[in-house]
Amino acid sequence: MRYFVTGINTGSGKTIVSAILCHALQADYWKPIQTGTEERDLETVKSLVNNDHCLFYEEAYWLNEPASPHQAAAMQGITIDINQIQLPDNDGNDLIIEGAGGALVPLNNELVIIDLAERFDAEIILVSNFYLGSINHTLLTINELKNRGLKIKGIIFNGPLNLYSRDIILQKSGLPELLYIAPEEQISQETITKYAIQLFQNW
């Protein structure tokens, strides 16, 4: 099974969620497009997943500028070609695919990040947060995913809890809550394990 982790914005917590998913499902990890060179999400997930089953695959595009993929690529004089982004051969293991930015972040002038989920026939896991405007951002993202006919596994909420926001998002979307990640002083392998156990119970 393939799962595509996308968020309602940049910095929603996709990388932490990807690590939790990899640990809970003993799944492999792949981020097709990485922008910015200071923090490589592949290395972050590697450092947080504490089991011997996960394999980690290199990016198809690793772009220097911490910007949207289409801008980061243009600044290097290239255009992202979706045909050059090929699924890793991972022998049928579950695969966690982490997107870049939010669901509609552009890859090039025609395509957006969520087009990769459709291309790879992956089920969506949406990471949502609680901030002023996040209800709108979450429901708009869900509507876009549904309009594209994509299958959504559920929502993972990340950050300081707002019960009013959570309840109305779940009510209006009809999607299940897979996990809530509370603010943590430090994200460690132990933290990932704790949430992986909770996720597995809701899976």
Image (cartoon, rainbow, N blue to C red):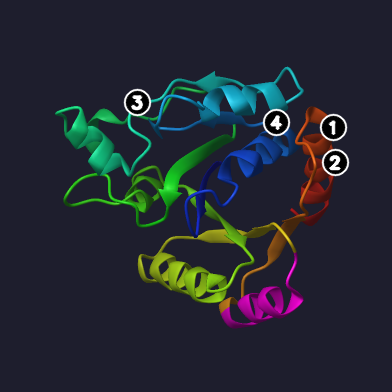
Q: Are marks 2 and 1 in contact (CB under 8 Å)?
A: yes
Vertical comparison of 120 with 78: above or below: below
Q: Which mark is residue 60?
A: 3
Task: Check disc 1 and report its element: helix, strand or loop.
Answer: helix
Q: What's the distance in space between the residues labelled 1 and 3, CA to CA?
A: 30 Å
Query: Which is nearer the eye, 15 or 119?
Result: 15
Tell me the quadrant of the picture where the N terminus can be found. Answer: top right
Q: What's the distance in space between the residues labelled 2 and 1, CA to CA?
A: 6 Å
Residue depth check, mark 4 versus mark 3: number of the one nearer the observer: 3
Question: In the orientation shown, which residue stands out farthest toward the top?
Answer: 52
Query: Which is nearer the eye, 147 or 110?
Result: 110
Which label's residue is closer to the chain start, 4 or 2? 4
Type of amino acid at the residue the image marks with label 1: Glu
Q: Residue at x 78, y 41 (%)?
A: 196
Other residues around mark 2 within 10 Å, as few (<14) / some (14–19) / many (≥20): few
Q: Which mark is residue 190?
A: 1
Other residues around mark 1 within 10 Å, as few (<14) / some (14–19) / many (≥20): few
Other residues around mark 4 within 10 Å, as few (<14) / some (14–19) / many (≥20): many
The x, y position of residue 22, in whole percent, is: 66, 34
Q: Are marks 1 and 3 in contact (CB under 8 Å)?
A: no
Give the magenta-colored segment's residue range.
Answer: 161-172
Vertical comparison of 198 with 169: above or below: above
Q: Is residue 80 visible?
A: no
Task: Check disc 4 and report its element: helix, strand or loop.
Answer: loop
